Image (cartoon, rainbow, N blue to C red):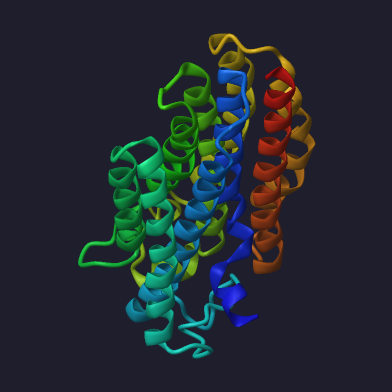
């Protein structure tokens, strides 16, 4: 149970959703069944990069004193003394090793460029809060999330199936990346005060709560606005517009972001945003499969 807590399961939709969307887009594009083992490897690799990043963040934030007893989010296993730092560090590298194994298989299937993408993703995960100048402490965490859980993973999942790139997955990767980034925005708004005291200058600390909430609104809204344009530009049937049915799920987390500052409410907003990404991506995936 402690290791499940350390893996932060509420963040895992950000790892699963882009693989589903990218693979479904490949099926729609090519018109034939996907490479099942490549799909499984991409999914496992993405999940374990996310878990490895979460563990690295747990370890590094504890060492830097960013995770304190007064934080509003769930307990972090390293700072709370539930697991020793060395064990968390070991688990981090085990998670990344699983991701590397998946990357090696994908490189055999679709070419060596996949290894470069995977290595860059792992390095970004480690340096998010680790290393001498962690970019997560400089307000750039959202950039990593958008790039990896949007552009890289959706287009990468498409590429390992088709070995080409196309307009449809590119547009979908931007929309999915926006919603994945919104998850981190909720996290940073929730932890704004404790991060400020710890010298962790996230985007929410730098721009202030009101602007961070506006960024959340823009990210979520843009994901839905972009969908019909992506379908049109990608010359796809309109079935992926099923994703618009997820709009009502955005209401509760948005209201919480606008009106609440307490940890329980913002933790629910975090889970709600993860659920929004999951449902949006699942509906788009179903639409793509119907269109195949």
Is residue 225 rendered to the left or right of residue 249? left
Q: Is residue 175 above or below residue 105?
A: above
Residue 78 visible in the picture: yes
- Residue nearest the observer in this picture, 49 or 289: 289
* Rendered location of residue 42, percent (x, y): 50, 46
Quadrant of the rendering where the N terminus is positioned: bottom right
Q: Is residue 240 above or below residue 94?
A: above
* Rendered location of residue 153, percent (x, y): 46, 40
State the image quarter where residue 163 is shown: top left
- Residue nearest the observer in this picture, 4 or 71: 4
**Residue placed at 36% from the left, 43% from the top?**
108
Is residue 14 rendered to the left or right of residue 257? left
Residue 185 visible in the picture: no
**Residue placed at 55% from the left, 33% from the top?**
22
- Residue nearest the observer in this picture, 102 or 2: 102
**Residue placed at 34% from the left, 41% from the top?**
114
Is residue 29 rendered to the left or right of residue 202? right
* Rendered location of residue 64, percent (x, y): 33, 77
* Rendered location of residue 30, percent (x, y): 56, 19
State the image quarter where residue 28 is shown: top right
Quadrant of the rendering where the C terminus is positioned: top right
Q: Is residue 63 above or below residue 188?
A: below
Count the marks: 0
As drawn, which residue projects farthest toward the left?
Answer: 132
């Amino acid at each position: 149970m402690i290791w499940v807590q350390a893996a932060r399961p509420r963040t895992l939709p950000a790892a699963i959703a882009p693989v589903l969307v990218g693979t479904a887009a490949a099926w729609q594009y090519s018109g034939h069944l996907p490479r099942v083992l490549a799909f499984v490897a991409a999914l496992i690799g993405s999940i374990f990069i996310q878990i490895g990043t979460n563990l690295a963040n747990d370890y590094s934030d504890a060492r830097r004193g960013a995770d304190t007893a007064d934080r509003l989010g769930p307990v972090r296993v390293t700072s709370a003394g539930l697991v020793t730092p060395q064990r968390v560090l070991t688990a981090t590298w085990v998670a990344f090793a699983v991701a590397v194994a998946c990357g090696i298989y994908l490189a055999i299937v679709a070419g060596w460029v996949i290894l470069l993408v995977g290595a860059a993703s792992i390095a970004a995960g480690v340096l998010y809060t680790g290393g001498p100048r962690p970019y997560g402490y400089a307000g750039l965490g959202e950039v990593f999330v958008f790039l990896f859980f949007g552009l890289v993973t959706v287009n990468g999942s498409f590429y390992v199936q088709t070995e080409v790139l196309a307009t449809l997955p590119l547009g979908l990767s931007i929309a999915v990346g926006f919603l994945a980034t919104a998850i981190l925005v909720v996290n940073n708004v929730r932890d704004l005060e404790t991060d400020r005291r710890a010298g962790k200058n996230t985007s929410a600390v730098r721009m202030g709560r009101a602007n961070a909430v506006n960024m959340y609104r823009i990210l979520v809204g843009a994901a839905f606005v972009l969908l019909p344009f992506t379908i049109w530009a990608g010359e796809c049937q309109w079935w992926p517009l099923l994703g618009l049915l997820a709009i009502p799920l955005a209401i509760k987390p948005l209201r919480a972001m606008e009106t609440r500052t307490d940890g329980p409410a913002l933790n629910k907003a975090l889970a709600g945003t993860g659920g929004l990404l999951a449902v949006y991506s699942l509906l788009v995936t179903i639409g793509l499969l119907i269109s195949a």
